[in-house]
């Protein structure tokens, strides 16, 4: 039987402000396996950060509960805090006039780690995250990528088995974000840490996650392994075409096949990129080509395997379509 580091049970958070009731997290049920990287995907405002804050015991649930590291987040909040490390993107919780080493020693004192032991841990963690050469430099001189590494080192001071990462690459340049993803896979995952990571960066999720849940308007739309999610929209059933012609007529006819269509700009302004998620293997590609030729000119067309972006667009658009029918 799989062992779960995090389980939520109808976890819900409702905010009431100025007479307005907002359901930020709506009866969420997820299970995160020990030693895995679990991605929570969603647009801004989907409820990801509120969910993380409840799991970190920073926000009390309105309904439901969760078990983190074997402890209930409401009944055993102190025990939960002892087994987690919280990492927030765009971290500003450091003392910028202190060095990286001094910051870590200060936070170690808050964990009540004896000074002699703290010095050993801080040195080891600075080496671990690759900041040994910058340990005595003031944090105000750190780059965003260095601050992100320092935030990871701080979260690991008490060597927690579970890491909650809320958009850890927020504010990082592409190079620093790539290094952070590599660090999560090559160092933290290999060390056996369980990681729950929130992001709206689909490339990031695809690079580091074992399982993914897609969240929208406070609800979990679907949760599964990356492979199963991609196969849920059909293997080799994503078609990308560059097309010139009567776009509206084309989209109307394609919709009659039950096909999800996304139109994207092309490097050549006169063309449009039309991305089709084919709902099943019964859709005849040759028939679709006839539909395209009826409305205009095809520059190029090819079929590829689904990506996580295709999955995300499918489930978000299905959800929006359902809302429109209410």
Image (cartoon, rainbow, N blue to C red):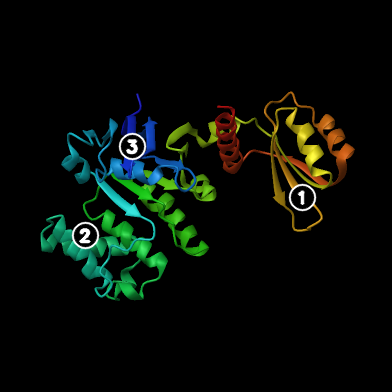
Mark positioned earlier in the residue sequence (3 or 1): 3
Name the spot of residue 312 as percent of width and height, x first.
56, 39
Q: Is residue 36 visible?
A: yes
Please determine whether, in this image, residue 160 is positioned above or below residue 288.
below
Neighbourhood count class around disc 1 (C-alpha, 10 Å): few under 14, some 14–19, many 20 upward? many
Q: Is residue 6 left or right of residue 272?
A: left
Mark 3 crowdedness (10 Å alpha carbons): few <14, some 14-19, many ≥20: some
Which of label 3 and label 1 is nearer to you? 3
Between circles 2 and 3, the one closer to the viewer is 3
Q: Is residue 76 left or right of residue 302?
A: left
Mark 3 vs mark 1, CA separation in Å: 42 Å
CA gap, disc 2 to disc 1? 55 Å
Number of marks? 3
**Label for residue 272?**
1
x then y, percent, for residue 126: 29, 64
Foreground residue, 319 or 116?
Answer: 319
The residue carrying mark 2 is: 121
Horizontal side of residue 229 vs 60, given as left or right:
right
Q: Position of residue 133 (x, y in %)?
A: 33, 73
Q: Which mark is residue 14?
A: 3
Is the N terminus in the top left, top right, bottom left or bottom right quadrant?
A: top left
Tag 2–tag 1 contact (CB < 8 Å)? no
Residue 16 is labelled as: none
- Nearer to me, 325 or 319: 325
Q: Position of residue 144 (x, y in %)?
A: 41, 67
Q: SS for tag 3?
A: strand
């Amino acid at each position: 039987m799989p062992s779960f580091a995090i389980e939520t049970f109808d976890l819900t958070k409702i905010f009431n402000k100025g007479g307005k009731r907002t359901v930020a997290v709506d009866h969420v049920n997820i299970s995160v396996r020990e030693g895995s990287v679990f991605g929570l995907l969603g647009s801004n405002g989907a409820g990801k950060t509120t969910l993380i804050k409840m799991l970190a015991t920073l926000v009390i649930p309105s309904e439901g509960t969760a078990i983190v590291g074997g402890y209930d987040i409401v009944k055993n909040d102190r025990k939960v805090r002892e087994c987690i490390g919280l990492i927030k993107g765009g971290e500003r919780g450091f003392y910028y006039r202190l060095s990286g080493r001094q910051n870590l020693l200060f936070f170690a004192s808050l964990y009540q780690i004896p000074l002699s032991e703290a010095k050993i841990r801080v040195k080891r963690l600075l080496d671990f995250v690759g900041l040994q050469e910058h340990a005595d430099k003031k944090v105000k001189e750190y780059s965003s990528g260095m601050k992100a590494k320092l935030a990871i080192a701080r979260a690991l001071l008490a060597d927690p088995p579970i890491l909650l990462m809320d958009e850890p690459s927020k504010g990082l340049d592409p190079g620093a974000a790539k290094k952070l993803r590599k660090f999560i896979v090559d160092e933290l995952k290999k060390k056996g840490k369980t990681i729950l990571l929130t992001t709206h960066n689909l490339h990031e999720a695809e690079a580091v996650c074992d399982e993914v849940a897609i969240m929208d308007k406070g609800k979990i739309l679907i949760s599964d392994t990356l492979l199963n999610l991609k196969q849920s929209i059909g293997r080799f059933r994503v078609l990308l075409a560059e097309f010139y012609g009567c776009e509206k007529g084309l989209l109307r006819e394609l919709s009659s096949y039950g096909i999800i269509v996304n139109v994207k700009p092309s490097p050549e302004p006169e063309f449009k990129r039309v991305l089709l998620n084919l709902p099943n293997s019964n859709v005849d590609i040759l028939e679709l080509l006839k539909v395209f030729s009826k409305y205009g000119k095809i520059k190029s067309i090819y079929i590829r395997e689904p990506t996580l972006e295709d999955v995300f667009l499918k489930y978000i658009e299905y959800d929006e379509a359902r809302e429109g029918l209410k």
